[in-house]
Image (cartoon, rainbow, N blue to C red):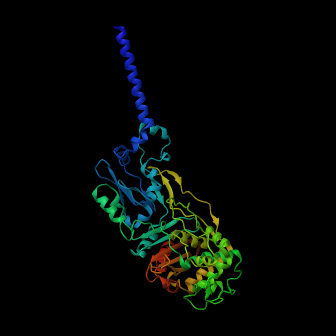
Amino acid sequence: MIRCIRHAAVFSLLLLVALLANSSRVQVLTADAYAGNPANRRAAMARYGQPRGAVLVAGRPVTGSRDSGGRLRYERTYTEGPLYAPVTGYSSQSYGTSLVERAEDGILAGTDDRLTTFPWWDEMTGARRPGGDVATTIRPAMQRAAFDGLGGRKGAVAAVEPRTGRILALASTPSYDPNLLSGNGRSVTDAWRRLTGAADQPMLNRAIRQTYPPGSAFKVVTAAAALDSGTVPDIDAPTGAPDPYVLPGTTARLGNAAGDCADASLKDAFLVSCDTVFAHLGAEIGLPGMVAAARRFGFDDDRLRIPSPVARSNFDTRMDTAQVALSAIGRYDTTATPLQMAMVAAAVANDGVLTPPYLVEAVTDARGHTVAPAPHQPSRQAIGPAAARQLQEMMTDVVENGAGAQAAIEDAVVGGRTGAARHGADGESTPYAWFISWAKAKEDSGSAVAVAVVVEDPAAERADISGGSAAPIARAVMRAALR
């Protein structure tokens, strides 16, 4: 009898050891496989089992959560969804997250270890932390001015505070309503297919993810390179540029839409936008000098995060002299995001100092305690202070006496640069109207804003003469900033 009990005890012990071994295998070796199995709904149910933290604009939430009563209980909601979609992105039970919703997902979903003092305790107990909030740098009046100014046309606006790098407006149109994607089911699937298949790409954030040829707006960078390198020691002196200008090593002749460009000074050429002068200067500065100048302003940087990734703005590093000349006037394969061109204007307004832009001011826990402040990247000198002040003078002249008149604001000093360009070399694509600018209140020189606007506009080829359709949008955004 004792022998049978002993055998039964040994057998039970073996079963217990086998059970523990299998449990360890499941929890340690194959846990990730089970967690990632599409049939396992536990992770999704836990993720959507509580309200998501809020994205804040000027201290007020522009996102929320709705109790759907389903297994994936809480769905994301958006206040003025199309207005803030280029900032928030979407949070969908079916299609994941984008933009700030993705970059700060751990905070918003409550999974970030910074939200608790003892992360190990939550791991042991399985406790679910409430989601934290993400405060953005966006100013509502400026965002509204940008969105309304674009009016549904294809285009984008980026506005930054030159001294700090805070992004004050980030608009992209046509936009979409993230509420359509929040839940799951047939309606969400249909909305996703409709939005992702739309010809006008409403889900594309044109302010940070789309690059455009900057055209004459790039002449700010070329002028900075000419001044900083000493190629132009005096902005009022003749440059020696002919009109027309034969591109080096070719028989191609480059002309101007404006007159009086032959041997024009840098200041006069900037005012009337002489392509020949700036192409000539680009060739004189040379490829290394132009590349260095463009990179100081942020071109060719694929590491920029705000915290969402920003598309790389391109200034080619392998060109012949003719291609350098064309790149100096924003052609060839030079491309830039609206945010990049706002950075160019901001550096000029900030006496040559470029402060990298950022969109998230701070993240807090559910009780409102700050978890992490805004991540500030170090500033750098994009252009010397003296050269920056000369550029400020030239950009102010464009608004006061040239094509940027539609951007003028009472009781403010405004500088600007118009531009027009096309994608591709066939000349058949729709042109883009650019306006990059900055404004400072006359009574408060420390109050400043820099804005870049791009609009896909069939009339954009007249932008260098009339200011195009982009300058009035920039004016509305800058006025909202200075109020």
Q: Residue at x 47, y 58 (%)?
A: 135
| Above or below: residue 166 compared with residue 456 | above
Quarter where residue 271 is shown? bottom right
- List the single residue furthest toward the bottom: 260
Q: Is residue 237 left or right of residue 254?
A: right
| Above or below: residue 302 compared with residue 419 | above
Q: Residue at x 45, y 83 (%)?
A: 459
Q: Residue at x 58, y 59 (%)?
A: 376
Q: Position of residue 233 (x, y in %)?
A: 71, 80
Question: Camera-side residue: 447 or 350?
Answer: 350
The answer to whether residue 339 of the structure is visible from this angle is: yes
Q: Position of residue 388 (x, y in %)?
A: 65, 75
Quarter where residue 229 is shown? bottom right
Q: Position of residue 390 (x, y in %)?
A: 65, 79
The answer to whether residue 414 of the structure is visible from this angle is: no
Q: How many numbered marks does the figure carry?
A: 0
Q: Position of residue 413 (x, y in %)?
A: 57, 79
Q: Give the quarter of the figure containing the N terminus.
A: top left
Q: Is residue 75 left or right of residue 205?
A: left
